Amino acid sequence: MTIDIITLTEEQYEKLSEEQIVAVQEAQLKKNRLSWSLEKKKLDEKHRLIGQGIFLSGIWEAYCASLQSEYEQEVESIRTGLAFYLQYTMRPTGSETPPYTVDYSLSIPERVQIVKEYYESTYEDPVTLFLTFKRDEIAPSYLSTGYKPLYDYFWVETE
């Protein structure tokens, strides 16, 4: 199964508990069912409009845009629920004390900003910054879905 409901690194997936993996799979299945339903509704409406001889009237595009909007809202709701669940179940287990503020009441973007600011203000060399961030055992669980984008950002900065 392809997981595209959230973006996690292989390292983050390896650290997920069995319950967390099940939650990710369930969220992905919900998204997949919504995608299939969306396509079926579009096809049914297309056939209906063709049968009535009004397919080219612009109704089809408006209908598809409306369905797509509903679909995106539903998927975002699933994604948000999954991120919330993972956020509060991916607590660090190591004894390492992070040098930046760890506050689970903050949103993921706020956490990413704190960690990003810490690393950028502490390390001038992008390679050292990236390698240190990569060894950080707290960041993957603390940043949750925000880890991979920050990881990628720091990696790109090394080039």
Image (tube, rainbow, N blue to C red):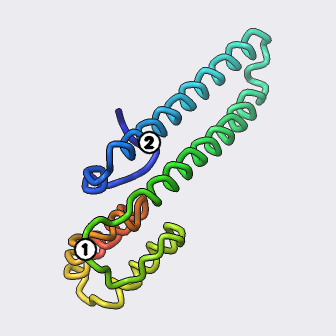
- How far from the left and from the top, in percent, is residue 107? 54, 68
Q: Which residue is mark 1?
A: 95
Whether 96 is drawn above or below 54: the answer is below
Would you say 131 lies left or right of 21 here?
left
Would you say 135 lies left or right of 102 here?
left
| Quadrant holding the C terminus | bottom left
Residue toward you, 60 or 11: 11
Residue lying at 32% horizontally and 48% vertically, measured from the top left: 17
Residue lying at 60% horizontally and 20% vertically, measured from the top left: 40
Total numbered circles: 2
Q: Secondary structure at mark 1?
A: loop
Quadrant in the rendering for residue 148: bottom left
What type is the residue that disc 2 sits on? Ala
Residue 23's disc is 2
Q: CA distance from mark 1 to mark 2?
A: 26 Å
Q: Secondary structure at mark 2?
A: helix
- How far from the left and from the top, in percent, is residue 81? 55, 49
- How far from the left and from the top, in percent, is residue 102? 42, 77
Q: Residues within 10 Å of mark 1 (few under 14, many from 20)?
A: few
